[in-house]
Image: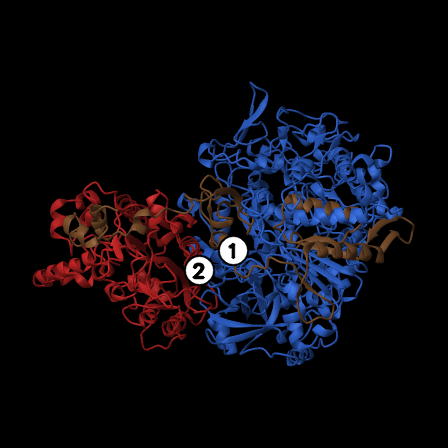
Chain colours: A brown, B red, C blue
Amino acid sequence: MGVRTWLESWPVYRQLTGSDPLGRGKAAMSRRSAELQPRTETADSMARSVCPYCAVGCAQRVYVSDGRVTQIEGDPDSPINRGRLCPKGAASKNLVNSKFRQTTVRYRRPYSTEWEDLDLDTAMDMIADRVIAARAARWEDADSEGRPLNRTLGFSGLGGATLDNEENYLIKKLFTAMGAIQIENQARI
Amino acid sequence: MVAHEPRTVPTETDLRDERLIRENRIFGPLDPAPEAGYGMDAPPRMGFFTDTSVCIGCKACEVACKEWNNVPETGLDLLGMSYDNTGDLTANSWRHVAFIEQPVSREKLAERGTATGGQAGKETPAFEGLPTSRVAAPDMAARAATTGKETGTRPGVPPSPEPGAAVEMATEFLGMPSTVLPGQLPGGERTDFRWLMMSDVCKHCTHAGCLDVCPTGALFRTEFGTVVVQEDICNGCGYCISGCPYGVIDQRVGDGRAWKCTLCYDRLKDGMMPACAKACPTESIQYGPLDELRERAARRLDHLHDIGETGARLYGNDPSDGVGGDGAFFLLLDEPEVYGLPPDPVVPTKDLPAMWRTAGRAALAMAAAVAVAFLGRRP
Amino acid sequence: MVAKERGAKIIHVDPRFTRTSALANTYVPIRAGTDIAFLGGIVRYILENELDFREYVLAYTNAASIVSEDFRDTEDLDGLFSGYDPETGVYDPTTWQYEGQEAAVQDRDPVMERETAMPLQHESHGPGVSGRVRRDETLQHPRCVYQILKRHYDRYTPEMVERICGIPPEKFADVARAWTENSGRERTTALAYAVGWTQHATGAQNIRTGAIIQLLLGNVGRPGGGIMAFRGHASIQGSTDIPTLFNLLPGYLPMPNAKLHETYDDWVTSICHPEQKGFWYHAPAYCASLMKAYWGDAATPENDFCYEYMPRINGDHGIYKQVLDMIDGKIKGYLLFGQNPAVGSINGRAQRLGMANLDWLVVRDLFMIESATFWQNSQEVETGEIVPEECRTEVFFLPAASHVEKEGTFTQTQRLLQWREKALDPPNDARSDLWFIYHLGRIIKEKLAGSTLRRDRPIRDVAWDYPLHGEYAEPSAEAVLREINGYSLETGQTLRTFGQYRDDGTTVGGCWIYCGVFADGVNQAARRRPGKEQTWVAPEWGWAWPGNRRVLYNRASADPEGRPWSERKAYLWWNEETGCWDGYDEPDFERTKPPTYRPGPEAEGTEALAGDDPFIMQGDGKGWLYAPSGLIDGPMPTHYEPPESPVRNQLYGQQANPARKVYDRPENTTHPSPPEPNVEVYPYVFTVARLTEHHTAGGMSRFVEHLAELQPEMFFEVSPELAAERGLTHLGWGHVITARGCVEGKVLVTDRLTPLRIADRIVHQVWMPYHWGPSGWSTGDSTNDLFTMVLDPNVLIQEGKAGTCDVQAGRRPHGPDLLEYLREYRRRAGIEEFHHTPIITTDAAEASHRCGRTDDGGA
C-alpha cells in the first residue's frame, strides 16, 4: 500500500481534503461499504421456482451460494406476481433453511418414549416390508356376490397438496398397482 | 375538515444547488448527497414513498427485509395491538406494520357530513344496521400503550408523544367525551369502522440526527442520499439513539451495535429495488428517485381528495420541515399521531451552527491531535 | 388493488371484518354457514327484476329446458325435493330430470353415489344427460328451468336474508345493485371465493348458487367474469387433476366401482355416455391410454388393457371413514406425505386416537409435526387417553425435500402448470416424495418378483421404469411428466392434444386433460416468457389445461353468431375469412366449427355440439341453472342451517341438509340444534380461518421464525358485546368448548366482530385461526379439535366452518380434568351418551318419498 493510498483510507484525511467537509458522506464510507455487492449478484446459481404455500402460483428466483440457499425472491418476469410475494412467500428462505428443520430419519419403536436414529436404506426396507404385510392382512379378492375387488384395506395414505403432479401421479399409480384404494389428499379436505 | 391546499414542493433538481448546499448543511432544504462529497453529479436521491391507502397489512415487507438483511427474529409476543405483534421499529425490525382499529359512531359520521367518515369509495358503513352497542378500540389501545415488549434491543425515544396518545385518538375518533370509560358508548353504536395499516420505516432524513451525532463515522450518507450504519465501524456508543427524532434507531442486545434500515444499500448499488418494496404486493411501498416519488404522491393525494378521502395527507415530503424532508415519506389517512408518528419532528442538531462557530477551532485542534495519533500507529 | 384502482368495486362478504374488508368498497357481515340464503336472495333479485342477461341466458343456459312434471320443489315439500328416501337419507333423482329423460337415471344407486362422492367424478363434466331436450324459448312454461328457479327462490326476500344471515336490507340492496349493474354486454363481474366456502355440509351447493348468479348475469366464459376459487395449497388443483383421492383416477376418470363397473366396457361406457354431447364421448381413448401408462406392455386390447388388475371401490373409503377404521384397528399402516391431520383435520382427537392405534405410521415432512409426535405431546397424552408406554404405533419420520430441492410441476388455482427448477440437493436424508414413492415401489417390486400370487401380478407388471440421475438415484420428473402428457407407441413422439389419444392401445397417456404440456417433446410448463413481452393473457407463461386455454368455456365470450358481446369485452370471435375462432386465448371450442353449425339428428359426442353450445363438457352443451343430475342433495341450492346451529331454519321445516353424510360414533357427537332442546348450552357460532402470516396446520409457518413471530400464539376474536356477556378481557385467556374438545387462547376483543340479529334474537360469532398445535417454535391448542365430522354428500368435504360452542374466560382445565369438564357440558346439553341431531325435521319426508316413486316408469 502506497503512502498516498494508505493516507486516503483515513477518513479524517478525506474529510479535510475532499468535498465532504463534515465527514458525513463519502469521507466516512468504509471499505466494506465501498465494496458491498448484493449477494444475488455473486450467487453461484439461480433457479426459477414457484412458491410452495398457496395456490396463486407466484414465481420465485432461488439463489444458491456454496451449497446453501442465500436468497429467495419474487420473479419479476411472472405475469402472476410480477416479482412480488406475500409474507409466507417472502419467508421461503427461512422455510428451507429453518433451524427447526429435521433432516435425518427418526424412528420411534412401539411403546417407546423416545426417538432413535435410523439409516435411510434400512427405513425404506422396513417400510416396504410393513406395506407388504399390511396389504396381505386385509386383502379382498371379491365381494360377497363374487364380483372382483382386487384390493386391500390394510393401509392408507394421505397427501398434502404441496406434492408435485409427478409425485401424485406415481403415488396413485403405485397405490393402484398394490390394490390400495385408501388414498386421500388435502384436495378432499 | 381541513382544506388541503396543494403545496408546491421544490424538486430535487431545485435542491441540488450550490448555495443551498453551502448554507443549509445543518438545517433547511437540501439535496444531501452532493453536500456529502459525492459532487453535483451524484446519482439522484432515492427513497421510499409508502402509500398507506393501499396497504393490506400483509407484513411481506417485514419478512422480506429480514430475509434479505439477515435480521434476527424478535421472539414470540402477542401484543394485542390489533394485528401488530412487532410493536415498533427496532434494531431487529426495520420495517414495522402498524394496525389501527377505528370504530366510528353514528354521531361522528353525521358530524363529518359524509356517509362513511370520509373513507374513499365506501358504499355503506361497515356495521350500519347491526346490533352493536359498545366499542373495544380504546381498550385495545390502552392495553397496547402499556405493553412492555422484550425486543432484544435497547429502544430509543418512544415515537408517540405520549403513551396514552392512541387511547385518546381512538376516543376522539368515536366522538366520545373523554370522561367516558373505554368500552362504553353512550347514545350510539359503532356504525362504521376502518382499519388503518401502515408500513413504517427509517425516514432517511435530509438532516439525520443519528448521522450528525455519530462520533465514529459509522453512520454515513450514501451517494443515493440515504443514511446507513456501517456495521464494520459501529462501536455501539449509542449516541445516535437520542439523535433520532422518530425513535427509529436502536441497539441490538448482545451485539451492542446500532441497526436500522439501510434502504438495502447493497441492492441499490446494483440498481436493484430494496427487498421490502420488491415484495410489496400492492405497491404500497414504492421505491425510486425522490423527485418522481413526490410527483406520484402529489397525484395520488389529489386523486384521494377528489374521491372524498378527506383525511389523506402526506407526511415527511416537505423539504422545509424540521428534518429537511424525509427520504422515506408517507401518505397517511389520518393524523400522524394516530400512527404513532411525531407530528413535527425536528432534528436535534438544528442549533448546531451556532455552537459550531465556537466549537470549530477546538474541533480542528482535536482533529490534528488525532491525526498525529493515527500517523504514529502506522506499522 | 390494481382492479380497485382501475375502478372495480370490491364487495367483501365475511363473518368478520378482515384485512380484505378494510380495503373493500363494501363490507358485508354474514352469519357463518348461511351463504345460500344470501346468494339465493340475489338470484331472486335478478329474476324478480328481470335483470338477467337474457340473450346469454336463452342461448347458453338451460333456462328454457323443460323439467319432468313429477318434479316437486322444496316450496312444496317443506324443504325437501321430490324423491327423498327417509330410510337411506338420499334422493332418487328420477323426478329431477328434464322431461322425457326420467328413465335415463333409473339404474342409479344414490346411496353408492354419496358413499363414493360420485359427483366429484363429474368435476369437469356433466353427468349423463341427453343432448335432446324440450325447450320453451319464451321462458313462460311453468316447468321450464327459469320459472322453476323463480318459484324456488321466491321467498328469499331481503327481509328473509336479514332474518337468516343478519345482513341489513340496505346493505343487501347495495350488493344486489352493484353485482347486477356491473354485468351484461359491456361489463362483467367476477366471483372469487376462498375454499372455506366449500367446507360446509352444503359446500357444493354454495358454489352452485354462485354459478347460477354468474350464468344469469352472463359472467361465465367471459373476461373479467367467472367463479374463481382461491385454493389454498401450491398444487391443490393438481392434486385433484392427478388425484391422490380414493374415488378418482387422473383426469377425473372414476375409480372402478365393483358393482357398477364389473367389466372394462361397463367402466368406459359409464364415462362416455354415448348418447350425450361433448368431449367425454372420447373417454375410451382416455381410459385405454391410462391403462397403457399403468400396465405397460401387459395391457392389450385383447385383455381389456389389464382392467382386471384395477382395484374396485364400493363404498366410502374417504379420509374420515379411514380415521374411524383406524380407531377400530382395521387399518394397519398410514403414510403421510406432507400432511398434518393431527392439527389440520377436523375432530383432531379422533385423528390422533386413530394414529395411536396403528401398527405403523410413516411421516414425510420438513419438520417434526404433530402427526409424528402425537404420542409425545398431544392433548390426549395430557388427559391420559394416549399413554406412550402403551401406544404401539411404530413411527418412521422421513425428512422431505423442500420445494427448491426437487424439480416438478405445481398446478396453481387457475389450472396453470408451472415447472420448478431444482436449486440444490436436499440435505442429509431428505429426499423428494418422487424419490420415496419410486424407490418404495422398486423395493416392493423386487421383494415380490418371485411371487406367483395372482394379487401380486399388477405389482410385477406395473410400468415402473423411469430414468434415474444423481447421487441419490432421483427419478426423472420430466420423464414422469412426459408419461402424463402421453406419447405414441408407434412413433415415440409426445402427443399434442388429447384428440390424439387412441382407444386401441397405440398411445400411452397418464392424464388426458394434461395432454399438451409436453407437446413437441418440450416441457411447456417450463416456459417463462416474461409477462411484459406478451399479451395480457400471457399464454406463454407455463401451460394451462386443457390445451393451454386460460378461460374455460370462452366460446361464451362471443354471442351466438360469434361476435364479441361488446368491443370492451372482446375475447374470442369467429373469423369468417379464415374460418377459425380468433382471439386472445386458445378457443375452448373446436377451432373451425362455425357458429352456424347445427348437428344432425343422429350426431353424438363432439359432433352433437352446435356452433353455439359453449359448455362443451355438459351433456346438453348448456350452462346449468338447474342441475337435473349430478348432485346428491338437490337440483337447486336450498338454504339449510349448518348441522349445528343456534337457530331454526326460517324457510323450511327441514333444518339441515337432509342428504348430509354423518358418522354415528361416540367420538363424533353433535350438539343439539333446533328444533331440539338445550341449544343454549352451546349458544354461540364459531368459524375458523387462516391468518395471512400462517399456513394451514402450521407445518410450514410455526417452524419458520420470520412468520411465527408475526402471529406468535393462539388467539381468538370476539366482539365487545360478547366479551361483556362472558366477562372476557382483551389479551386475557379464554377458552372455547364443544362436545368434541376445548381450545384455549388469548382473547382479542375487537370492533371488527359484531353481533348479528338473526330471526328475533342476537347471535354472537367467535372467530378462530386454526394454525396451532403443541409442536414447533410457536405452539398452542388446535382449533379443528372443536368440529364434528359431518360431510357434504356430493364430494365428502367436511363442515369445517360453522359450528356452535360456548366461550368462557380463563384457561381450560389441563390433564384428566378436561375430560370431566367436557362431560359436564354434554350432560347439561342432554347428550352425554352419543348424540346425533335428527336428519329429518319435517313431516314432509313421506310425501317426498311418494312423489319420487317411479313404479310407473316415471315418464
Q: Nearer the viewer, mark 2 or mark 1?
A: 1
| Image position of C369 (left or right of C654) | left
Mark 1 sits on what residue? A97
* Residue that protrudes farthest toward the front in the picture: B379
Residue B112 vs residue B171, the one in the foreground: B171
Residue C734 is tagged as none
Left or right, B307 with reference to C120 = left
Q: Secondary structure at mark 2?
A: loop
Residue that protrudes farthest toward the top in the picture: C577
Front in this rendered view, residue C365 or C349: C365
Say above or below: C213 vs B91.
Answer: above
- Residue type at mark 2: give it: Ala
User: Disc 1 sits on a residue from what chain?
Assistant: A
Write down the quadrant of residue C411 in the picture: top right
Residue B126: mark in rendering: 2
Location of residue C586 by image quarter? top right
